[in-house]
Amino acid sequence: MSETPLLDIMEALREVPSRVSMGSTGRITDMTKYHSIHGNSIIDIDSFWLDVTNSMITWRKAPTIGLKGSFGDVSNRPLSWFEDGTLNVTESCLDSNLKTRAEKTAILWEGDEPGETRRISYSELLELVCRAANALKSLGVEKGDRVIIYMGMVPEAAVAMLACARIGAVHSVVFGGFSAESLRDRVIDCDAKLVITQDEGMRGGKKIPLKEVCDEALDGDSSVKGVLVYRRTGGPVNWNPVRDVWWHDFVPLQPSECHPKECNAEDPLFILYTSGSTGKPKGLVHTCGGYITYTSYTHATVFDIREDDVYACVADVGWITGHSYIVYGPLANGATTLMFESIPTYPDAGRYWEVVARHGVTIFYTAPTAIRALAAAGDRFVSVHDRSTLRVLGTVGEPINPEAWNWYYDVVGEGRCNVVDTWWQTETGGICISPIAQATPTIGGSATLPLPGIVPQLNDSEGREITGEGEGLLCIKYPWPGQARTVWRDHSRFVSTYFGHFPGLYFTGDGCKRDKRGYLWITGRIDDVINVSGHRMGTAEFESVLVSHSAVSEAGVVGFPHPIKGSGVYAYVVTQPSEEWNQDLSEELNLLCRKRIGAHAKIDLFQHIPGLPKTRSGKVMRRILRKVAEGEMDSLGDISTLADPSVVGAIKDGAKKILYQSD
Ligand code: WT7
């Protein structure tokens, strides 16, 4: 009989029962298991995902059907998963946890001021959600109605999302940095019946006037019949007695139980707006059964979730990361999920690590932009705080450069934590390409390998597949349960944006390299989307704001490499003949972007040019704008089709002054 070291047995006894059940597919603990599970997941997609969902998710009527439809046929029939199943996702996130985790902390809230915390157990969270759900019903919200959530990072934002889900209403969270105009556009697009907001938000010691922005957005005729207002700061607000209701006056009076509405797997769970290459943000629709299956599976797999983890994803619920990996995935797995109201540099650049030390955080998930900014602030902000509880470190939102990855691994993780660089998108619903903590050997800068169920394909621009080592456009070959099903009330836009490039493939908009060992390295967006500090911005959104100013006749906006933000925003501006270009005008234009788009929309560099580089048919040659902003002035390619090639010289000369200002 071979001997098993006692420590291994104790480790096995300690770990196995404490992990989330994953069905017969099991945990991925090494690469042999990864390859076998990934292989099986592709051979029989339906049984793989049916097995995952039936073992992880609480269904009212368990599904027997997996996928219906295909990428080649999305224009005729939206994809569906588990379509004969019925459920309410809050039963997976809340009720199902009451048996063994009623007193366990579900939401651990860290407020803006260090040490300002709240702990909400699973039983308390269920009660809060039920009261809020009953409040929504009393305010006339019914299954299928849209509710906009415009809040900061308070637990009530998660409660509001789950309350909508409890009654089958469709939430659409709008990030609290968006302007009144952006909020209004979203209210109109989804025809919202109710808005949930708060008096003010708190971020880094500053107050964000959420209710005031909301009032401005709803000014005049609106589909919105009620506004439920959570009191966070007690700051002054204007009150519309016909429309506005205080959360604290109304929600606590509601019954503490609310029967979960039985929904079809394919009923919409939420709409989330995201920037694309045209001016108008798209409302991506995620549905109940597939989304909750995919977020819980990927959350448990990638981060190797264990029962006593304190899991902290420091994103905002206004973005998909917050939906999938602060709220739905972690709660469906019965985890303790930390919600962080503040910013990484408040009161100083050690805040994250101070939070890690104080709460004993074991898994920490953030964006490369924060890592770069904190690395630049100096290691002493890290080393003064105890990080010995950390086990897994994650990143998301943009490519992470190897220097930042190494700093995260060596300095923050003291060389002993698994770092997972997770690639995914609002559209994918959850992580698609990522190391699996504990299993995948990592190299800084590579998102490594696809998760089970995901088959990436690299194509050249003509649609030929690139196999083996090479670089191309990142596509995904087969459907997976977590992906968005459509664009709200614009299915043809969904089809043309994601399936119009290469028939039968999902096109991501990203470039990607595959190395010798098959590892994937995301190189960034290849379309007119810029990833600024992990926030996705459409160049067309900036351009339409710029040309709306009376002094501007034309504008072209592109990204450029930025040492902290990943990409910065570079605007080429052509002024009206009678107008002069000066610093005041650039400041005015930035104020306008802030007002029209939001606080996160800022142009980093302006260049005044005599004219945009256009072809004889009048099309702007964006390639030239991009190359010049990247400082690659000598590799502009063929410019013979330009109507006036002399503009290129002027653009290059002007750019040199801007890009090499300090020389
Ligand atoms: C775009 C999606 C996914 C939640 C946050 C962003 C970029 C995302 C990575 C990564 C390289 C990444 C891509 C993608 N991106 N993660 N690990 N490495 N790039 O969601 O706002 O929908 O943006 O973010 O360009 O297409 P999003």
Image (spheres, rainbow, N blue to C red):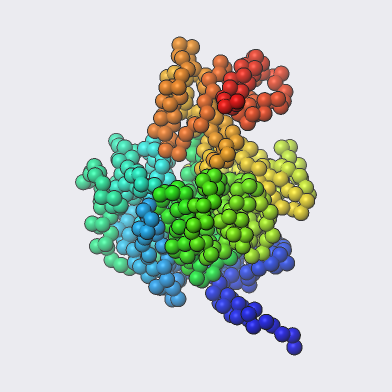
Question: Based on the displayed image, in which of its 4 quarters is residue 20 positioned?
Answer: bottom right
- Tell me: 390 left or right of 632: left
- Residue 504: image location, x then y, percent: 68, 47
Quarter of the image that includes the N terminus: bottom right
- Residue 386: image location, x then y, percent: 50, 62
Give the camera-side residue of 290 and 403.
Answer: 403
Vertical order, 654 against 15 (above or below):
above
Number of disc labels:
0
State the residue at coordinates (41%, 25%): 588
- Tell me: 108 left or right of 431: left
Question: Based on the displayed image, in which of its 4 quarters is residue 416 positioned?
Answer: bottom right
- Residue 581: image location, x then y, percent: 47, 17
Vertical order, 630 against 142 (above or below):
above
- Residue 292: image location, x then y, percent: 51, 60
Vertical order, 206 against 335 (above or below):
above
Res 447 visible: yes
State the residue at coordinates (71%, 18%): 640
